Amino acid sequence: MTAPRTAALARLAAEPVDLLVIGGGITGAGTARDAALRGLSVALVERDDFAAGTSSRSSRLVHGGVRYLEHGHLGLVFEASRERRTLLRTAPHLVRPLRFTWPVYRGARVPRWKLVAGLALYDALALWGNVARHRPLAAAGVLAHEPALATEGLVGGATYWDAATDDARLTLATALDAAAAGACVLNHAQVCAMTLPPAPGGETRLRVHDRVGGDVVEVRARAVVNAAGPWGDAVRRLAGGGGADAVLGAKGVHLAVPAHRVGNRGAVTLLSQVDGRVMFVLPAGAFTIIGTTETPAERGPDEVRATEADVEYLLRSADAFFPGARLTRDDVVSAWAGIRPLAARHGDGRGTASASREHAIERDPRGLVSVSGGKLTTYRAMAAQVFDAAAPLVRRTVAPSATAARPLSGTAAPEAL
């Protein structure tokens, strides 16, 4: 075992921490960073590797959520648009502008007039502060951007802007920045037991298993944040929590195929001709990413996999718009599946597709704060709110969050931001 790891384990066991965060995905890393920058003693522990779960299995987008407009989630779009602008400014080495082309075909569920009106609202919710405004296009304009698209029935479309990222690198950079601010950050460290104090004001006692060396250390914390994503309900049960599950799992699958097989020049937003849901075809160097599905999670997050049905759905959806592709199973270079940990209380009984991506925060006054839901784009704002919920448990006066203005670890020229 390395000396830094031995030192981190010793540090965990030595003194009580103000805040212990469970879960090294983007939400947990963001919460640890936010709290450490406010001057608290913080520990972040992750059972596997950082971003090993949902945070490395996304569409790799930082976006306002144009498809959420259809379900009336205007508050979420407003917040996500603001956070997209913040990340473009504070993490330009990891978050870059990306133009999307959205073609419209005759008989589409979203006609051209409705698309243009929706994108105007999308720009307005960004307070006209996006990289650039949307542009309506005639059919010839759509094909000028994406000549490999099907021409039959094409009536026009539009371009609009969002941003792309490397989700795993964004998570790791956030965890590294938390460590640079003083947090004790440790992966392959699993919380295997948790005892909350009998009344508010005491310390939570936890046992953390080092999955590298095999040791178990005792940790004390004034407050604990459960940011375990799709594993969140298991952590709640570890702390003695009962009742209904707080996490509504939605499985999402993406594929990577050689870019030359599809022929897309940039990012394309499509309405799948299989079921009408919004999906993306995204550039990724020598590859094209196709995604995503959304189905109820029938297995736990440790067993989730892309099925043959998932692969067939994505290939059929892409082929319908890129007729020259003729994609087959043999074209699939990679497939990944993750579980979106949606907040169960935001579900409306009609399935995961219409469930809000807004997050939910629950606080046990004895010392545990649990967060579920949310999305990659809004992680920074969500982390600040999670810590604000935990602050009364820590019983210390703290400064406001500083993460909206602080460049993320690895930014080349922070003085220029």
Image (tube, grey):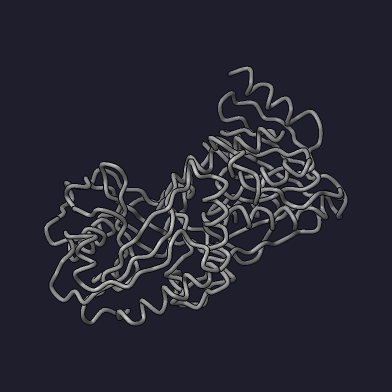
* Quarter assignment of residue 188: top right
Total marks placed? 0
Name the quarter where the C terminus is drawn: top right
Residue at (82, 49) in percent of width and height: 398
Against 313, residue 183 (above or below) is above
Residue at (81, 36) in percent of width and height: 16
> Looking at the image, which is closer to me, 84 or 339?
84
> Looking at the image, which is closer to me, 299 or 5?
5
Residue at (83, 55) in percent of width and height: 392
Residue at (54, 51) in percent of width and height: 87
> Looking at the image, which is closer to me, 283 or 135?
135
Against 293, residue 15 (above or below) is above
Against 411, residue 373 (above or below) is below
Q: Position of residue 251 (x, y in %)?
A: 41, 59
* Quarter assignment of residue 353: bottom left
Name the quarter where the N terminus is drawn: top right
Q: Position of residue 4 (x, y in %)?
A: 63, 21
